[in-house]
Image: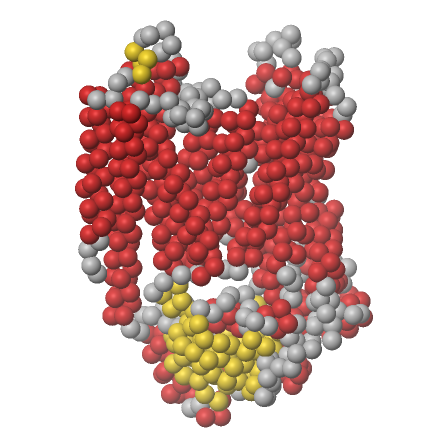
Amino acid sequence: MEETARNGLAVETRELTRSFGVRKALNNITFELPEGAFLSIFGPNGAGKTTLVKVLTTLLNPSSGTARVSGYDVVNDAVELRHHIGLISHNPLLYPDLTAEENLLFFAEMYGLKDPKGRVNKLLADVELDHRRLDVTGTFSRGMLQRLSIARALLHKPDVLFLDEPYSGLDPHAMDILDGLIAQIRGEHTFVMISHDLDKGLELCSHALILASGKVVLFEERQNIDVRTFRETYRATVGTGVA
Amino acid sequence: MERSNSWRQFKAILRKDLVMELRTKEMVTSMGLYALLTMVVYQIALAEAGDTFDVRLVMPGLIWVAFIFMSMLGLNRSFVHEKDQGCMDALLLSPVDRPVIFFAKFAGNLLFLMVVELLSLPVFSFLFLQGRAGIGNPIWLLGVVLLGASIGISGVGTLLATMTVNTKGKDVMLSVLFVPLMYPLLRAAVGATFAAVIGGPGTVQTFWLFMAWVAGFDVIMVLVAYGLYEFVVGV
Amino acid sequence: MKRNLLAEIMLGLGGLLTSAAFFMTFFWAAPSSYPDGRVDFAQKIFYFHVPVAEASFLVFIFTAFYGIKFLTTRERIYDTKARIATEVTLFFVLLTMATGILWTKVEWGVWWQWEPRLTTYFILTLLVIAYFVLRNSVEDEEKRAVYASAFGILAFIDAPISFFITRWLNSIHPVVFGAGNSSGLEPPMLITFIIAQVGMLMLGYAFYQLRLREEELKERLEALKIEIGD
């Protein structure tokens, strides 16, 4: 097993750029996120938030610059890195025609887990979906789907969890449950969350990042952030019409 | 450390597609229904041709027309499943080599297509060939051409459907790209089917000559599709 | 950006040569005749039809070539080059079809024959049109470029297979070259043909370069707009 440069950083980007022709979806992004942190990424539509997460999760390659997640390079160690990251999106990323159990077992196979059955049982219990394990997920409510998708993302015990607007489309009750689940696992993972909701994002995060036009406008630890000036900075980026 | 294993992943994707299909029967039903509908249309098309007309002369063309259009229904469905709730992203996010996805989806599509083809051939002969001259050559030759051509259809189709599911017109787009690319394969498949159906001296040899074209197309085009797959899923 | 002088010279020269070939066709190259001695006047379209057809396929090579280059480098310019090569291909393919149909009508008495070259060109036309339909139906620019490159490569490999299988099946199209040791053409005919062919390739090159320059200017404009927007 190759030794990785962990140095206590969960995410590390250096002049990360992704461009096509003259358009730059990501422009010279450099930041470092320590292990165990919770990063909230804010920014208007089209600012590059999704692209950044896609690059960090190996779905897209950067045009230049480098990024390491959990010590692995997103280009050179992509396959290895995928063992160490999970994604929870507003899309459930589950097959509606498979049962809850089949869905998890399928992804357990994809990750090559040693004891898929045992791991799936444990996770179904954790997200309190034991009783629905044999139902196809097409019949699940939005909140249940979100819980199951968290179980899917945690199957292989990832170091870094990416959250792509996980709260969007959830009713207040489901939001509470999601809050609870995130609080439970907070200590075990590093989180990177895309958020539209300033309050929610600031409430959860230890670090905040504002993107606009593919550039980092602000990257700061939560404790150094004054909420009012932060709000103004955010509003200014949305207001410039770069969205 | 837990390792991912390509063979295990291949089986997992294929099994997942089979379980889904056995549960919903969505692809096989829609493809089979489509095949039945084309046969009604064929009855209309042949209505004025008279009783003495030898249907075997046009049968190879008719069945391949039905199969090519039917295959596109299945291919399109197969990737709409992956696209609908973002499952393709989840798949790409897992530690799987992209060709594994290609070959697993390819195998699943091939299987479903073959099943519907094998079901609809007897129906075709029941409806159109009763009381007429039978199949001239051993019937297993038909199985060979079905398999050969379906490999090319599913292989290239898997690549194209992966792209077209992300386009505006989805199914229409698939047919625009797919049909002209399939021309040489279909032409050879019809030739081989014709040789198998008509029978007589020299037709077995003709059959294998056409099959050589089918095999050549399969090898070249499926290899190219496989080579291009990684690029296509990487955006 | 400098003017592309070479392309402009090629445009002028190509126009001159094809026009010259046009006159040579009628006033210098002897008309060929049928085996029974009648004059085969329709054969004259050969000096236009074949150069156009060959130009179309030569340009199509660049669609595949730049498609591969794009996929391996992800430089947008290669996608632009592939697209323009395909545009020029479409132009030549349509001219080939039009002249081919005219000739078929005169020579065989029908407008259309499912004959190897015509069939291949019919398929090629559909493939080239499909390439543009595909581009129009993908919104994301990079996705569009990747898909178009992949399809361009597939189409480029598919077209010759179509050609060889139809030719293998049955060929009733005149095979002018490669049938025997000599080309079967009298010197004036051959010279006329070569001039037409060279002229047509020059035109193809000029169309390609001038269109490319137009696209590059568009992209520069876009870049400036983004710069100002910042």
Q: Is residue B222 visible?
A: yes
Q: Looking at the image, which residue sits at the far front?
A: C181
| Snapshot colouring | secondary structure
Depth check: give the residue in front, B195 or A243.
Answer: B195
- Identify the residue at image location x=44%, y=24%: C180
Q: Quadrant of the C terminus of chain A?
A: bottom left
Whole-percent x, y for residue B40 in the image: 62, 23
Relative horizontal placement of residue C154, taking residue B114 as reference (left or right)? left
Q: Is residue A21 placed above or below A219 in the rendered structure?
A: above
Depth check: give the residue in front, B139 or C228.
Answer: B139
Whole-percent x, y for residue C11 in the image: 22, 43
Number of dots carrying numbers: 0
Q: Is residue C19 placed above or below A14 in the rendered structure?
A: above
Q: Quadrant of the N terminus of chain A?
A: bottom right
Relative horizontal placement of residue C138, taking residue B116 as reference (left or right)? left
- Identify the residue at image location x=56%, y=75%: A73
Q: Quadrant of residue B110?
A: top right
Q: Is residue C68 placed above or below C17 in the rendered structure?
A: below
- Identify the residue at image location x=61%, y=33%: B213
- Identify the residue at image location x=57%, y=11%: B48
Whole-percent x, y for residue B81 in the image: 62, 52
